[in-house]
């Protein structure tokens, strides 16, 4: 139940910089080769940084995509904005525009599945604390977690005419407790309470009798990525209780929190799962197996190694994926991935596909709730934002095409580069399978 992208001494070589010669016909390097022509950023869309990447000439299709978005990059200071798994609702904490309100925080729900997005404020008689957490549910209600002395109290907020209704759910007595991302089923909400030797897993909404303790998971667990659309399989990043490398594990919620290994690239590397797409099986990971922290990708249940694209390395910038294009059944390499890029100039958006091996950097709308967004099945990215001109809006951004310079399509639809082969085509070498993992995720088949 483990994943190996580098084996037979290659992992150690990756960490020390030593060169290891592969066996005949077997590639062991899981890192994409640098390709400046494909990974360079466009100057019109790439915000400045302390050490910018040398750009290549701007391409017409990317200029058109970035025109509707004002290239205004300001540091985001708003609390996090959370979307439901299907992107229909969002929720955040915000403050009143009235100067007299000061820092009076209240919950706000965004409805995003209609023709026009709109926000519904959910204030109560007493303002919320800035460190409270909110989570939208599929029925339009908003779950809120409040810290009350040594307890974490949970309630559901919903609009009732001119006011706000509140349904208390109960409390959990733990020193620390953090909500997990919204469950794909739309009605359940889970939380983690990390201790010294174990981590408690709680169902805090969607149960029959208020918060329910599901399991105590060994070690310190964090993160949280859903592996299926039923809300049964949850991936967590687990650190052993006595210390050691962090490894992603899969937790089966219908079997009492049964835990199985999910990802292991090298024995001593920290391997975290950042995103997963249940339709295609595409995984986005962060690991230091190559020698330092890198973004990589793999496919759930695949026999291919995890790869670490060179184009996802940006000098003096932090890069974090936040959304994967759904609906690409059995085509993980064609999925568009949205990334948040943070640099000295602020935050902006990156779009990348595994097959394209090119990172497109695009300006975000002013007031973007950085790190939030959702893809449509057709490859349109919705970026929620709020600024001085609007309290609730979504900017739509189509994923750029990954067309290489000098490559043109033939009449039959195939591409040609203007160069003819100098020898007969040879079959690819037979590679020894290096499995990513035998994850407990089944049923990923193409629709009829």
Image (spheres, rainbow, N blue to C red):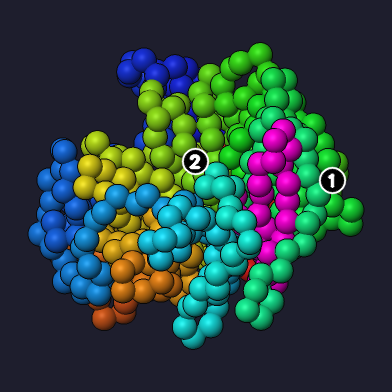
Q: Is residue 262 magenta?
A: no
First in sequence: mark 2 vs mark 1: 1
Q: Is residue 170 left or right of residue 91?
A: right
User: Which of 59 and 246 lies nearest the eye of the viewer?
Assistant: 246
Q: Label 2 neighbourhood size at 10 Å, few (<14), some (14-19), many (20+)?
A: many
Q: Is residue 270 left or right of residue 439?
A: left
Q: Say whether residue 244 is visible.
A: yes
Question: Going 73% across and 46% down the picture, which residue do you hit?
Answer: 153
User: Which of 247 and 209 lies nearest the eye of the viewer?
Assistant: 209
- How far, Cα to Cα, is label 2 from label 1? 30 Å
Question: Going 66% across and 49% down the picture, which residue do you hit?
Answer: 145
Question: Going 44% across and 22% down the picture, which residue do you hit?
Answer: 10
Q: Position of residue 123 (x, y in %)?
A: 59, 64
Q: Is residue 173 left or right of residue 69?
A: right
Q: Is residue 60 left or right of residue 438?
A: left
Q: Is residue 143 magenta?
A: yes
Residue 285 shows which numbered tag? 2
- The magenta region covers 133-158
Question: Going 76% across and 50% down the picture, which residue do you hit?
Answer: 204
The secondary structure type at the circle numbered 2 is: strand
Rendered view: 406 above or below 311: below
- Of the two numbered discs 2 and 1 in the rendering, the one whose residue sits closer to the viewer: 1
On the rendered image, what quadrant is the C terminus found in? bottom right
Q: Say whether residue 353 is visible.
A: no
The quadrant in which residue 46 appears is bottom left
Residue 212 shows which numbered tag? 1
């Amino acid at each position: 139940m483990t994943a190996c992208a580098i084996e037979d001494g290659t992992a150690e070589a990756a960490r020390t910089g030593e060169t290891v010669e592969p066996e005949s016909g077997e590639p062991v390097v899981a890192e994409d080769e640098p390709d400046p022509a494909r990974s360079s950023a466009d100057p019109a869309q790439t915000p400045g940084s302390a050490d910018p990447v040398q750009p290549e000439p701007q391409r017409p299709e990317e200029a058109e995509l970035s025109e509707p978005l004002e290239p205004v990059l300001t540091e985001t200071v708003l609390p996090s904005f959370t979307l439901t798994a299907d992107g229909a609702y969002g929720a955040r904490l915000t403050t009143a525009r009235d100067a007299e309100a000061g820092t009076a925080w209240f919950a706000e729900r965004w409805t995003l599945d209609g023709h026009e997005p709109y926000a519904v404020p959910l204030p109560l008689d007493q303002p919320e604390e800035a460190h409270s957490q909110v989570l939208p549910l599929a029925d339009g209600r908003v779950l809120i977690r409040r810290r009350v002395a040594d307890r974490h109290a949970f309630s559901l907020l919903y609009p009732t005419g001119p006011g706000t209704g509140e349904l208390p759910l109960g409390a959990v007595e733990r020193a620390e407790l953090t909500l997990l991302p919204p469950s794909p089923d739309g009605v359940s909400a889970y939380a983690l309470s990390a201790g010294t030797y174990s981590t408690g897993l709680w169902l805090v909404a969607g149960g029959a009798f208020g918060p329910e303790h599901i399991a105590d998971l060994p070690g310190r667990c964090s993160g949280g990525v859903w592996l299926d659309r039923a809300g049964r399989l949850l991936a967590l990043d687990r650190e052993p209780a006595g210390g050691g490398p962090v490894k992603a594990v899969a937790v089966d919620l219908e079997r009492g929190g049964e835990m199985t290994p999910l990802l292991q690239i090298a024995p001593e590397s920290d391997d975290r799962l950042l995103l997963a797409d249940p339709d295609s099986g595409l995984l986005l990971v962060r690991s230091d197996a190559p020698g330092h922290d890198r973004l990589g990708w793999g496919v759930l249940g695949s026999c291919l190694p995890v790869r670490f694209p060179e184009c996802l390395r940006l000098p003096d910038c932090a890069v974090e994926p936040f959304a994967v294009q759904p609906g690409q059944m059995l085509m993980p390499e064609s999925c568009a991935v949205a990334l948040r890029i943070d640099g000295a100039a602020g935050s902006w958006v990156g779009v990348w596909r595994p097959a394209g091996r090119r990172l497109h950097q695009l300006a975000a709308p002013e007031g973007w709730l950085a790190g939030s967004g959702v893809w449509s099945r057709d490859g349109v990215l919705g970026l929620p934002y709020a600024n001085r001109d609007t309290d609730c809006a979504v900017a739509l951004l189509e994923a750029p095409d990954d067309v290489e310079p000098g490559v043109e399509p033939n009449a039959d639809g195939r591409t040609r580069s203007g160069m003819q082969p100098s020898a007969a085509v040879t079959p690819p070498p037979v590679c020894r399978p290096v499995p990513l993992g035998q994850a407990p995720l089944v049923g990923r088949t193409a629709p009829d």
